[in-house]
Image (cartoon, grey):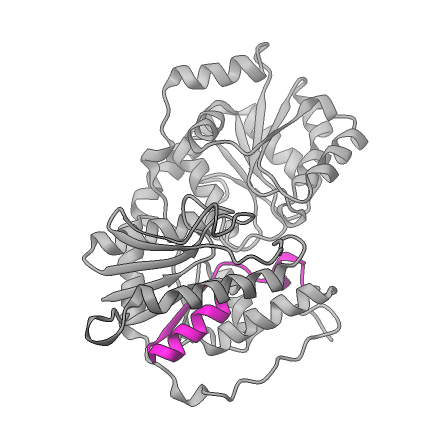
Amino acid sequence: MRVLIVSWEYPPVLVGGLGRHVHALARRLATAGHEVRVLSRQASGTDASTHPTLDETVEGVRVLRVAEDPPHLEFERDMVAWTLGMSHAMLRALPRWLGTGGSAWRPDVVHAHDWLVTHAAINIADRLEVPLVATLHATEAGRHAGWLSSGVSRQVHSVEWWLAQRADALITCSRAMRVEAAWLFERDEAEITVLHNGIEPRRWQVDPSEIDEVRARYAPDGAPLLAYFGRLEYEKGVHDLIAALPRIRRVHPGTKLLVAGQGTQEGFLVEQSRAHRVRRSVLMLGHLPDHTLAAMLAAVRAVVLPSRYEPFGMVALETAAAGAPLVASTAGGLGEVVRDGVTGLSFAPGDVPGIADAVCRVLDDPAGAARRAETARARLASEFDWNTIAAATAQVYAGARRRTDLSGTIGRPKIPTGNVFGPG
């Protein structure tokens, strides 16, 4: 098949797990013989004079990285306007990229990844009259525990709703996300396909000497090391882990927490570590390159993922690939990825005593933690293989049929004034 993937991130432009997902999927589809193109963007904050539009073929995938337009728009400050600008730049660059007349390249399907590319993806699918497949990686309501209190949140939710309504086929990364998307966007669960994210375990293997270097740097006295990695946002629950750290240190003195990642809550987390009197025991490492991150994960006694909201939990697979014991909340997809007592230990989202208890159980029983980590790693090849996931995605493409009845008939969604997951 000829596949056009539209994504707001694609290496080297990476914001979170979505870009890695699209990268792995595109490469595996190309390896399987499909003709794959990816429409993406240059890094934010650049422009056409520093980072012009680039058309290149990388690892069998043809990629168009569109330059940013001149207006001063910032994603963090002008989120919706910024996404509209990105879509506008994509649509202006597209005709020349696809060609015209008899030499034009026409995809069999357009695959949109998340709400940020909604305007571009719907426009392309409508113009070319081909099916539109959409993968919903998360929702605005889920990220805010069901509340759409700000104007921006209501705008984002309405764009998500439009994409979910317009898509000819929908994909989510977990069963929990399927239930959430069906409820929020008024789609039948039977119309939504669940395809887990995949993992490439070999990328997470490091030399033992590198592991020793991490331990010598952060715990020269042999004290237990814990780690969190990922975006530093409220829904990730890192503040709950920091709140649990004093309880953990009372049982296991000297325990330190390594926090790798960036996000809007970094300052808040520093304040929380001071409030709980563990500031010197919480080390904020910022963004780490993958190889450095892999060495850190392999060096710690446990990786703790305290998410309050988690559509899938790619970090759980990466933890397993690195061979680290895992302690995770049961939020969303994490409850599906992590099998309590088998591949890791679990606790309820927001349960600070539960976090402390689970972590102490790992630190008290290193042999048991190692067995669970090995079970988790062995499971990756059978349940989270990218070749299998790419083949299943291609089946969704092949089965997608354009719904002509939707043309011009989708109205605006009603935005609840209360919690969208609760009454009123």
Question: Looking at the rendering, in which quadrant would you find the N terminus?
Answer: bottom left
Task: Determine if the magenta segment contains residue 132.
Answer: yes
Q: Quadrant of residue 421?
A: bottom right
Q: Residue at x 54, y 78 (%)?
A: 186
**Residue range highlighted in magenta:** 117-146
Q: Is residue 109 magenta?
A: no
- Name the image quarter holding residue 273: top right
* Image spot of residue 387 (x, y percent): 26, 51
Measured as percent of width and height from the top left, residue 393 is found at 31, 62
- 128 relative position to 330: left or right: left
**Between 68 and 133, which is closer to the camera in this rendering?**
68
Residue ranking furthest to the front: 49
Residue at x-position 51% and y-position 89%: 409
Whole-percent x, y for residue 28 in the image = 27, 52
Residue 152 lies in quadrant: bottom right
In the image, residue 96 lies at what x, y percent? 33, 66
* Viewer-proximal residue among 105 and 338: 105
Residue at 23% x, 76% y is 101
Q: Is residue 245 above or below residue 19?
A: above
Q: Is residue 366 visible?
A: yes
User: Is residue 171 something that shows in the picture?
Assistant: no
- Which image quarter holds the C terminus? bottom right
- Locate residue 359 relative to residue 273 in the image: left or right: left
Residue at x 52% of width, y 72% of height: 182
